Image (cartoon, rainbow, N blue to C red):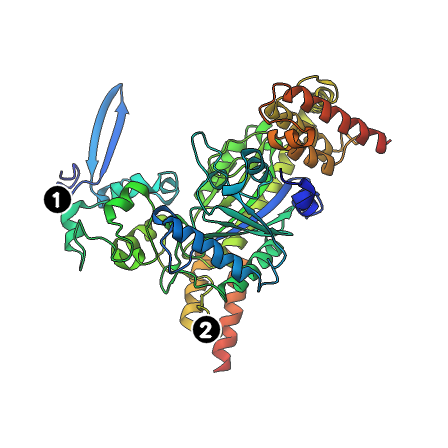
Amino acid sequence: MIDLSLLPDGGMAWLDASGPGSHLVLSTRIRLARNLADHHFSPRSTLADREAVLQEVLAARRETVSLRNALVFRLDQLDRTDRQLLHERHLVSKELAGLDERAVVKPGAALLVQDRVGVMLNEEDHLRLQGLRSGFDLEATYQEVDRLDAELGQRLPFAFHPEFGYLTSCPTNVGTGLRASVLIHLPGLVLTKEISKVLQGLAQVGLTFRGLYGEGSEVVGNFFQLSNQTTLGKSERELLDHLAKMVRQVMEYEEQARQVLLRDVPTIIEDKVWRAYGLLRHARTLSFEETTNLLSGVRLGVGLSLINRVGLYALNKLLVHTQPAHLAVLEGVHPDDADLSVRRARYVRALLEDEAGRRG
Amino acid sequence: MRCDNCHEREAVVNLTQIADDQKVEVHLCEKCAAEKGIETAASFGKIPVGSFVAALGKGPEAIAALPGLTPSGACPTCGASLTDFRESGRLGCADCYRTFEAPLRDLLRRLHGSSRHLGERYAAPGEDRGEEAPTTERLREQLRLAVETESFELAAELRDRLRALEEGR
């Protein structure tokens, strides 16, 4: 079993709600897709290729500052709970963790992580460099992942084409290989039913959205990941500037929507927030999905200063720790444990009670 | 199959329309489909690459006509063929991008609106990593793109850099 404390801030530095715009944006993530020029891409790679990719990157990272002291997790040697744990921390994709039904962990699948940067190995691309920070901070996140890219690029032969740029297994990632995403909480736009208009608008300017866990995941708790759709034909800066501009716009819309709700239906909003808080504080069983939705309501209340018995950090912590694998590890049981929803409710009650006590 | 609209070019888009409870199938060539506004950059993003690439196929004859490429042509490095790519939506290795350069260039333009990488340049280990001095042409191209995408902050910066470069000469 992975010791949670080994991960930087238990891997939760990105959830400490210290970054800019944390009341709306949970985290900023940037990944760069890279491949080694002299090995077949993942879908056609042999076992030897995959092991070689892993060993070459492990050797190269020792000479870098960004990953010299990285923790190394070989997903192909971890049990399912641990893989799920890393996925719940947003450190590895569902695919790399082999969590889909009937999926197996591919040989050589690994994760390196040090502070706010990391690398997924032998995913769809040989390397997926990633940076993750609290709040809305594309600039700082990019600087860190760009440095990691430069450090590794000096030591490893990346596949690069003079016209097409960095080459990737899927042509949708070619060029910069850059996908930047901002995890944002938009209950105001959902409640005012403006959200579909906003999402359609984003699609028209080349942005896309996903759920809490990235590609293929559903939207729960009004959390949306907004990201760039294309990776080629624009510089990294242009892609980031464009996304930043649009995210700022969405944040403004969300603030406006919240003010409209407070102005037009204050009682309904207050009731929604306090009901959510009441259920979390007193319920005896809670599914993860229900918890996430209720946390969304309380989070809205904190944003509107309707409720001060709980802070953003505690809400973020609950969001992470009530996920099945996290809760199971904390409680020392299996994620399929029949009593998990009872344990979850107990955990939430205790944390909220403690938080309310501390805040007087 | 010929295009239902111009009756000249090969149809590549099959459109199912439902009007008054009647199902009508329309087959269009790329050009006529584009004119009818069926292909938009926004809608492309929603189509999985595999099926998209399949739809893109202009028939085996068109592919055979490309220099050095036959329908059964495979990448000399990894053995992947265009058919493999159409099915999986994934390339087999870096050399696939050279082997299938022409059709891929076409695809990249459709997916991204451009096939030209304007981001950071990579220098392999041992190569001189000295930053390539920006040329006025390159800056102008970036400026044009910045204006097109309404990235005005960037456009202003590029304009200043362009001015500085031109004045320096």
- x%, y% of residue A24? 65, 39
Determine which of the numbered discs, if any, sits on residue B126 in the image. Answer: 2
Determine which of the numbered discs, if any, sits on residue B8 in the image. Answer: 1
Residue A304 relative to residue A85: left or right: right
Q: Which is more toward the observer, B134 or A79?
A: A79
| Real-space CA distance between mark 1 and mark 2, rounded to the nearest whole angstrom | 53 Å
Is the residue marked by circle 1 packed among few (<14), some (14-19), or many (20+) residues within 10 Å? few
Q: Which is more toward the observer, A225 or A234?
A: A225
Residue A244 visible, this orientation? yes
Say which of marks 1 and 2 sits in front. 2
Q: Which is more toward the observer, B78 or A359?
A: B78
Q: Is residue B169 above or below residue A217?
A: below
- x%, y% of residue A269? 68, 24
Element on which disc 1 rests? loop
Q: How many marks?
A: 2
N-term-proximal mark, 1 vs 2: 1
Is the residue marked by circle 2 packed among few (<14), some (14-19), or many (20+) residues within 10 Å? few
- x%, y% of residue A156? 47, 63
